[in-house]
Image (tube, rainbow, N blue to C red):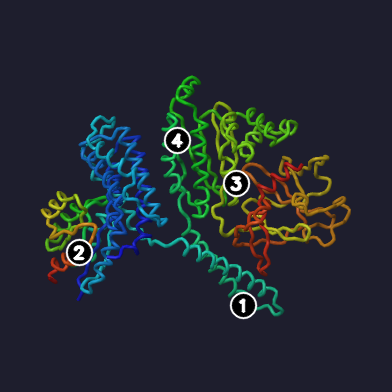
Amino acid sequence: MDVSRYLDLFVHEATEHLEALGRDLVALEREACSKTLASAFRHAHSIKGMAASMGFSPIADLAHGLEDLLDQARKGATTLGPDSMDVALRAADTVTRLVEDVAEKRPLDASDSDVARLLARLRADRHDKLGGMELPGELSRRSFGKAASSGNVRTVRVRTDVVDGLMDGIGELLLATDRLRQAAYTAEQPSSSLSEAVDGINRIGKSLYQRVLAARMIPLSTLTDRLPRALREASRSLGKEVVLETDGTDIELDRSVLDEIESPLGHLVRNCVDHGIEAPEERRRNGKPVTGKVKLSARRDRDRVIVHLSDDGRGFDASAIAASAVEKGVVDSFAVRRLSSREVVMLACEPGLSTTESVSEVSGRGVGLDVAKSSIESIGGSFEIESVKGEGSTFVLSLPLTVAIQRLLLVEVEGETFGMPVSRVLRVLEIEPGQEQRSNSSRKVPLFDDWVDAYELSSVLRMAETRQGRHCGNTGGRGAGSSPNGSFPYVIVEPRPGKLAALEVHGLTGHLQGMVRPLEWPVSMLGAFSGVSLLPDGKPILVLDLASILRTAETGA
Amino acid sequence: MPKRVLVVDDAIFMRNMIKDILAEDGDFEVVGEASHGLEAIEKYKELAPDLITMDIVMPFKSGIEVTREILRHDSRACIVICSALGQEQLVMEALEAGAVDFIVKPFKSEEVLKVVRKTTGLG
């Protein structure tokens, strides 16, 4: 029988079982539970059966060894102590690696030394009765009801590129409909039946879009379920005791967003364990519980998801970060004094600082943060650090629900049109010239009862070569948004959670629901832009990366 | 008329493989699939198939429990157990519960077809 046609299905299903198995094993290590043990056994068993059918004997053998160990424990013939758990987890890891090899079409090595060693350990462990875990002998067979009802939801497996293709198609459809609608409205002889028909197509397009979008949404838990493994590896190797708590992870995000944050999230969790959580004796000395806590919580805020990843460890040492930032020339010693402690902590994400080994020792935190921050920002997200020295720190990730289609506010600067993600726009203000606060280096505009830092978008983007006196009537050729007295509209944006800024533009030209595609090199190097979209007439516009624009504006101020 | 088959296994991979093997033989038609024990019982009542291929290790209810329950409901039900190597004891248990025969994973199409033809009276 030719089994090659089952290869994709094998990789997919085996990966699912491996993820579930990993979750079960970590849960078992925390607490003995016959139900979890039975579930772990089933996953190992399924992997074995599939691998044997495909003829992948190293995978089948290892899964078989694992299955046996779990079966013995299930029957109460052996207990799973920390060492057995370690072997079981290692075996699961090795199987994962082998399945990846299969996925990448790499040949499996039948004499893989890892496999042989683990098999021997697994067999030895079956007879290990010294472990620490007591297992309830009788399996509960009555917990069917709840989970069984979910069996009524019918699902189909679809390749992701098929869904992506659908999404692309609908994006184009919406664009074409917009174009048609404009044509219908501006026709010399407007026809109400044509307009109605176009509106009808538009409604259908939008509802289709919503449905496909929903099909691409996956719960955050698909990622966070793997974190206990990462956390366990990190804490065990460092001899630390850490528990992970999660909350709100059933929230759904677009698959492309999850793909992008998978590795940053792993980095950040490891960072919490490596550098945040103190060693047990240090915690005891400081009157903290010996077991450290890492907590991940997620909540929806308009069309964004805010993820807080916090630890109750030692926090960031702002003065150490400041000192090494000056030493490395990231900031000068004068500028560093003007920074708030929060801004100083964010310096840990600067590439020059965060990648050097020595700084990691001094400030204890930097490594990998720059990578995490830039991957999160590349999808229109933002990354912040909140930290209290001695008490712990929180990484705050603000993520878009989807990156594919965004609503954009169209603004005009120096005659050029740009898109601003509506999700970051709070409001648009018209400010009378006398209402602002100005000094040589900064400008503020009133918002509610507060003042917000204001910047000219044209100068942040360096589009204005020389512009003398913005109230001298030199507004020729600019957008329709400027009022008769010569003032320009300000767009109040929230580039980072909790941080507002006012960006002065020359005009507002409308809004657009557009497919935003990532920029390709070398345009992607510009930094101020997060993507490109198309106007209804087919003209491309750049989408502003507000977080990076604010950074440029702040450092330039 | 082809024999109507219900395929029960928690892995899509295995279900697909059995379906493909049965499709090689024009005498069988897979009319339903179930991914766990409870679904298998429901599907059996709904479809009344001529043959069930039954995995043993599944969530919620094992194939052996399901076999007992289906046979209690309909003593003429024809159930073939799908087992993996090393599950001899479970296979014995299933046969005692009333399963008519068994096939062993990894499946070989000739063997699978031989067993299912025999159990459904196709020889």
Cα separation, mark 1 vs mark 2, equals: 62 Å
- Residue B55: image quadrant is bottom left
Q: Quadrant of the N terminus of chain A?
A: bottom left
> In what element is the residue under mark 4?
helix
Q: Are marks 1 and 2 on the same chain?
A: no
Pick whichever, A186 or A230, lies toward us: A230
Cα separation, mark 3 vs mark 4, equals: 23 Å
Name the spot of residue A189 as percent of width and height, x first. Answer: 70, 80
- Residue assigned mark 1: A194
Name the spot of residue B76 as percent of width and height, x first. Answer: 12, 63
- Amino acid type of disc 2? Val
- Residue B11: image quadrant is bottom left
Identify whether A190 is placed above or below A13.
below
- Residue assigned mark 2: B112
Q: Residues within 10 Å of mark 3 (few under 14, many from 20)?
A: some
Judge depth for marks 4 and 1 and give the one in front.
4
- Amino acid type of disc 3? Ser
Q: Earlier in the sequence, mark 4 or mark 1?
A: 1
Identify whether A1 is placed above or below A45.
below
Pick whichever, A401 or B80, lies toward us: B80
**Going by the image, does B36 lie left or right of B103?**
right
- Residue assigned mark 3: A374
